[in-house]
Image: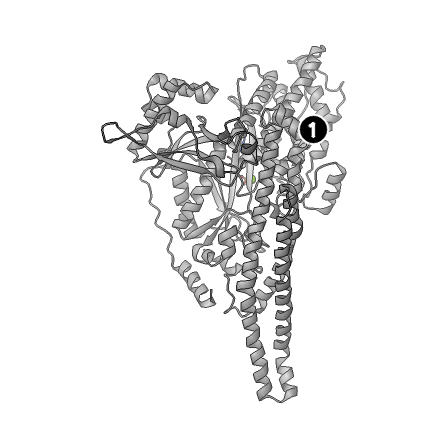
Amino acid sequence: MSASLRFAVVGEAFKKQPMDVPTPSERPSEYFGKYVFDRKKMYKYLPAPVYAKMIDVIDNGAALDMPTADAVAEGMKRWAMELGVTHITHWFQPLTEGTAEKHDGFVEHDGKGGMVEEFTGKQLVQQEPDASSFPSGGIRSTFEARGYSAWDPASPVFVLGDTLMIPTVFISYTGEALDYKAPLKKALHAVDKAATAVAQLFYPDVQKVVSNLGWEQEYFLVDEGLYAARPDLLMTGRTLMGHDSAKNQQMDDHYFGSIPDRVVAFMRDLEIQALELGIPCKTRHNEVAPNQFELAPIFEETNLAVDHNMLIMSLMKRVARKHGFRCLLHEKPFAGVNGSGKHNNWSLSTDTGILLHAPGKTALDNLRFVTFIVETLMAVYRHNGLLKASIVSATNAHRLGANEAPPAIISSFLGKQLSDVLDHLEKTSDDEIALAGKQELRLDIPQIPELLIDNTDRNRTSPFAFTGNRFEFRAVGSEANCASAMIALNAAVAEALMDFKERVDQLIADGVDTMNAVLTVVRNDIRTCRPIHFDGNGYSDEWKAEAARRGLDTEACAPLVIDRYLDDASVNMFAKTHVFTKAEIQARNEIKWDTYTKKIQIEARIFGDLCLNHIIPVATRYQSLLIDNVHKVKEIFPSEQASKLSANNLNLIGQISSHTTFITENVERLVEARRVANRIGGEREKAIAYHDTVAPLMEQIRYHVDKLELIVDDELWPLPKYRELLFVR
Ligand code: ADP
Ligand code: MG
């Protein structure tokens, strides 16, 4: 694009008025969940016994029989048709990015030559999408060719446009999970069971423990016209080249700054649509980088929260286009400014309260609090490498270890008060913590109540921080499916709690009273998991060395991080919690490596094209202009004066030559590196080759392209620059 065209595009952006966002006449409290078949609608559209049955299915996981499913489908159809719905789809989360759907019309032959609208329980409960082109990591060839999707009644169906969307799991006929939801539900079940058993040590009435997730979604907005002129953004979601803007985030003037009108219009539109879909949006603000923003809802049960995050990501992209923006969910769209993540705020709660909540007044509450904190830390300690593997990807690798959240080492920030509590418990002698049965449990932990008040010493560099009543897993990538992290975390915590309970039970069997048994195991575990606790600066070099000394996983190479899934500790943990079999883990790893390779492969191809077809020709043209000028100067000035006058241009001509030569030669090497890597048989080894040879070459070449951007006449430069992409709004 010529510069004039480029600026025409920018001009267009400035001309764009904030879109008219239809203001609903109702309040959010009134239109919240308008397009969701929630309990209120179920109550209205289902016969009373069917409603009661469905509540049992949703709340207690009771089995769903076909007559009930038929009756539910009939009620759903009635509701949906009132909203103009004509189609249904099973909506699932395959191991690619995003979600998948296949639409079927309600229409059926009526047997009399006409049509009727039909929707049966069978269609609601199960479908067989053609699964052959979804990644299965070889599961289908090893096991069974077909896959099917099955309704997840725990996540309510909703209406999007003319379609009734039915959240489903996606599994092979032999039972292996081909998606994120199936293992997530297993992990949530495992943590419910394990945490309920432990919670009952304190409160015998507890029946169920729920895992909560509150995600904070970061994203960039870029003007649509500029986006269209960047083939790299269009094809890979990030800029593969581009020099820093003279101004970027150094003034810190964007974070929490006032939100530009056009962006506010987008956000309002998005929030209204999200609320109508039952997503409880609450917070919105500018983020650290220019044109970077964040959206966060009120936390929800983890399975539902994951679905809502998947839904909001697709909604964001759609609504952005309506407002002349493109929404970038890539973890690192721009070099030199902050990337985007998705903080996963996680906690466990019972029907009576949050288990990680800073304690109440009784010693029993205090010990419950400490138990759940410490066992979470045990899980993170034992599986720190695995948790990193659960968030790693080709795109998130740009954040990992690159001096912004998250560091490539998983550790946990606890803050002063909580650290003091744990230290105190660990160091106090048994005699000091004199215990005589539940009633007289004297657990002297005076600091705890302050936790709630003084929660300000937040450490932004910690990938897993305690923040008052929850842990915040900050390493999750902005475009990732949260389920990956939530599967690993919930399963690991389930294992820690199971293991905890086994040891407590053993002590009780040996005659120790319950609270003493709990205390003994907790104190032991505080000592064991000490290495995971780190309140310092997670970006410092000292920490890298210290973490290695502590035995934490410090690997930063993404394809190698993925190996952690196959560690014995991981395989055993996933087997014990019934989340994954080893075959499933192997298959999923194959997909992860393959995806990694493909991402870098696509980037390298587009990068090569841009270099050869956009950058080199333009640089050469500008160089010719300079050469021309040097000749002309020579013609009209005496030679000594001419050389003086042309010194600068001659220097530039030389610089351009050296940059273009480097680029040309190394793009050839890049192609060759790809060729070599592509010949490698195993997915893992291929991914490693892409990591070791292809990715670094792109970085090296980019340096020279970015230098050219500084030299070449702006009029000629073919791509919108960072200052335009980041500041036009
Ligand atoms: P910050 O940016 O300071 O971390 P935000 O207010 O942006 O905080 O987001 C906090 C997120 O944490 C919200 O989604 C909120 O609902 C969620 N959250 C709050 N309490 C809990 C909890 N106990 N368990 C899980 N998530 C929680
Ligand atoms: Mg946060």
Above/below status of 15 relative to 560: below
Displayed quadrant of residue 112: top left
Displayed quadrant of residue 471: top right
Above/below status of 62 relative to 611: above
Q: Is residue 413 visible?
A: no
Q: Is residue 340 left or right of residue 12?
A: right
Q: Is residue 427 left or right of residue 168?
A: right
Q: Is residue 603 visible?
A: yes
The residue singled out by tag 1 in the image is 422
Q: Position of residue 558 (x, y in %)?
A: 64, 43
Q: Residue at x 71, y 25 (%)?
A: 525
Q: Secondary structure at mark 1?
A: helix
Above/below status of 41 relative to 720: above
Which amino acid, by three-letter code, is at mark 1?
Leu
Q: Residue at x 64, y 73 (%)?
A: 654
Displayed quadrant of residue 39: top left
Q: Position of residue 426 (x, y in %)?
A: 73, 26
Q: Quadrant of ligand 2?
A: top right
Q: Residue at x 65, y 68 (%)?
A: 658
Q: Is residue 81 left or right of residue 697?
A: left
Residue in the foreground of this view, choosing between 46 and 336: 46
Q: Label 1 CB, ligand 1: below 8 Å?
A: no
Above/below status of 83 relative to 499: below
Q: Position of residue 107 (x, y in %)?
A: 30, 32
Q: Position of residue 398 (x, y in %)?
A: 61, 48
